[in-house]
C-alpha cells in the first residue's frame, strides 16, 4: 500500500506578524465560511486521486487554523476522514496560535483525532514578541500547553525564532529553557529570515532594524543544540529536535521527498512525480469552489535529474543524511557515477562525512548547507 501525507492550509490570522510572508490574511472573518466550503469541496474531489493510498500524516497549518469556528474545522476533518484511508497511527497535527486556542477548541481537536499540536511560541520576552508583531503573551503559551495536556494531547511542538534584532544570548537561552520546562516533545528552532515584502524587510532597509551578526546567529544555533541535547532532545534535522519517538512524521516525509497532497489557498502538492500548487487568490479559490482543475496555478513534472538533486539536498537536511542504497533503488543509477566526485570533494573540504551507508553534513557543512545543497544540483 502506498503512503501519502496531506496538508491543509487555513489562510487566516488575527493579525499579520511583522516578519511573516506566508499566505495568510487578517480581518477576513467573513471569508471563513465560503473558504471552508471550497476547501471541503477540494478535499472531496482530490480524494479520487488518493485511492489506493494510506494517509500517514495530516498537517493543518496556515495561517491560524484554530481561528476558524469549531463547526468549520469539524467539517474539514469530516471531509478527510470520510473519503481518505487514514492509517490507524496517522500523525494529525494542527498549528495553533497560543493567543487564540481555548479549552473547548483543544478538547474538540482531540475528539476529532488530532494527536499533535504545533504552537508558535517564538520567544519568551515581551519586547521581542511585540517586535515580531505576535498577538500572544508568555501566559498564553503556558495556558495553551496546559489546555492541550488537559485535553490529553501530549505531543506538542513549539516553534522558536532566533537571531531576532535586539535578541540577546541570554534571551535566547531563556526562551529555550522555558520552552523545555513546558514539557513539549518537539522544538523547531529557526533563524529569523527577512522576507521581501514584509514590514520587517522594510524596517531593515530603512535602518530601523539591525540584523544579528552571522557570528551571533551561529552562536545561538549551537546554543540551542547544546541545551536541547542536554535535555534529551534528538536533533534529527538542521532545525528540528524531538524527544525519542516524537520526531515529526509529516516533516520527515517532506525531507524524504515522499508524496503529499495540499488543499487550500497556495497549497503545494508533490504527487506521483508532479509538483503543483493552488492559486494564491482567495476570491478566485472560493469562486472556483476549490475545483482542482481550475485552481492550479503552477505545475511541473519533475525530471529524473531534479528528483535526484532533491533527494540529495532534502535528505542531507536530516542528521542521518542520505543512504546510497536508497538512492540507487529509487533511481536505478549508480551513486558514484552521478555524485561520487561531488561527495568526495565535500568530504575533503570537511563539509560532508561518510556514514556506514551514505553521507551526512558535518558541523561545518551545516553552517554552509546552502553551498553543499547547490553542489548537488544537476
Ligand atoms: S500567526 Fe503565523 S501565519 Fe499568522 S501572521 Fe503570524 S507568523 Fe504568519
Image (tube, rainbow, N blue to C red):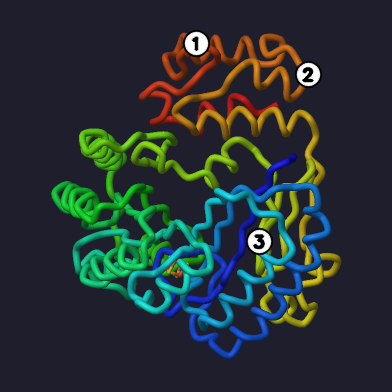
Q: Quadrant of ligand 1?
A: bottom left
Q: Which residue is mark 2?
A: 332
Image point 41% across, 43% down: which residue? 246
Say which mark, if any, is on residue 163: none
Mark toward the start of the polypeptide (1 vs 2)? 2
Mark toward the start of the polypeptide (3 vs 2)? 3
Q: Which residue is mark 3?
A: 267
Callout 3: 10 Å neighbours few (<14), some, many (20+)?
many
In the figure, is residue 317 to the left or right of 148?
right
Query: Would you identify the image quadrant in which residue 117 lies?
Result: bottom left
Q: Secondary structure at mark 2?
A: loop
Image location of residue 161, percent across then percent down: 33, 53
**Alpha carbon separation for disc pair 1 and 2:** 21 Å
Label 1 with label 2: CB-CB less than 8 Å = no
Say which mark, if any, is on residue 356: 1
Q: For residue 130, say whether it is visible.
A: no
Quadrant including the C terminus: top right
Q: For residue 352, say whether it is visible.
A: yes
User: Is 260 located above or below residue 378 in the figure?
Assistant: below
Image location of residue 241, percent across then percent down: 36, 40
Q: Is mark 3 within 8 Å of ligand 1?
A: no
Mark toward the start of the polypeptide (3 vs 1)? 3
Amino acid at each position: 500500500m502506498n503512503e501519502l501525507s496531506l496538508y491543509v492550509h487555513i489562510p487566516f490570522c488575527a493579525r499579520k506578524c511583522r516578519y511573516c510572508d506566508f499566505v495568510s490574511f487578517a480581518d477576513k472573518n467573513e471569508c471563513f465560511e465560503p473558504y471552508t466550503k471550497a476547501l471541503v469541496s477540494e478535499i472531496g474531489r482530490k480524494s479520487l486521486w488518493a485511492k489506493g493510498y494510506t494517509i500517514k500524516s495530516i498537517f493543518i497549518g496556515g495561517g491560524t487554523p484554530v481561528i476558524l469556528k469549531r463547526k468549520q474545522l469539524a467539517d474539514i476533518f469530516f471531509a478527510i476522514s470520510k473519503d481518505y484511508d487514514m492509517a490507524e497511527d496517522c500523525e494529525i497535527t494542527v498549528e495553533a496560535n497560543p493567543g487564540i486556542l481555548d479549552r473547548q477548541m483543544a478538547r474538540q481537536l482531540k475528539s476529532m483525532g488530532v494527536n499533535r499540536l504545533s504552537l508558535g511560541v517564538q520567544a519568551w520576552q515581551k519586547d521581542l514578541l511585540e517586535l515580531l508583531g505576535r498577538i500572544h503573551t508568555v501566559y498564553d503559551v503556558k495556558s495553551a500547553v496546559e489546555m492541550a495536556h488537559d485535553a490529553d494531547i501530549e505531543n506538542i511542538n513549539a516553534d522558536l525564532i532566533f537571531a531576532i534584532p535586539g535578541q540577546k544570548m541570554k534571551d535566547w537561552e531563556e526562551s529555550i529553557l522555558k520552552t523545555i520546562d513546558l514539557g513539549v516533545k518537539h522544538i523547531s528552532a529557526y533563524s529569523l529570515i527577512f522576507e521581501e515584502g514584509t514590514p520587517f524587510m522594510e524596517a531593515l532597509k530603512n535602518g530601523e532594524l539591525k540584523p544579528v551578526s552571522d557570528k551571533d546567529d551561529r552562536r545561538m544555533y549551537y546554543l540551542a543544540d547544546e541545551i536541547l541535547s542536554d535535555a534529551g532532545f534528538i536533533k534529527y534535522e538542521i532545525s528540528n529536535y524531538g524527544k525519542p519517538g516524537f520526531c515529526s512524521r509529516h516533516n520527515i516525509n517532506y525531507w524524504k521527498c515522499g508524496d503529499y497532497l495540499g488543499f487550500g489557498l497556495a497549497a503545494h502538492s508533490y504527487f506521483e512525480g508532479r509538483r503543483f500548487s493552488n492559486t494564491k487568490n482567495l476570491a478566485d479559490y472560493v469562486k472556483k469552489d476549490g475545483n482542482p482543475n481550475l485552481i492550479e496555478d503552477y505545475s511541473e513534472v519533475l525530471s529524473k535529474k531534479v528528483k535526484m538533486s532533491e533527494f540529495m539536498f532534502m535528505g542531507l537536511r536530516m542528521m542521518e543524511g542520505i543512504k546510497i542504497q536508497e538512492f540507487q533503488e529509487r533511481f536505478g543509477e549508480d551513486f558514484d557515477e552521478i555524485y561520487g566526485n561531488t561527495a568526495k570533494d565535500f568530504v575533503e573540504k570537511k563539509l560532508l562525512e561518510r556514514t556506514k551507508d551514505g553521507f551526512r553534513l558535518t558541523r561545518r557543512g551545516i553552517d554552509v548547507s546552502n553551498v553543499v545543497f547547490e553542489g548537488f544540483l544537476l
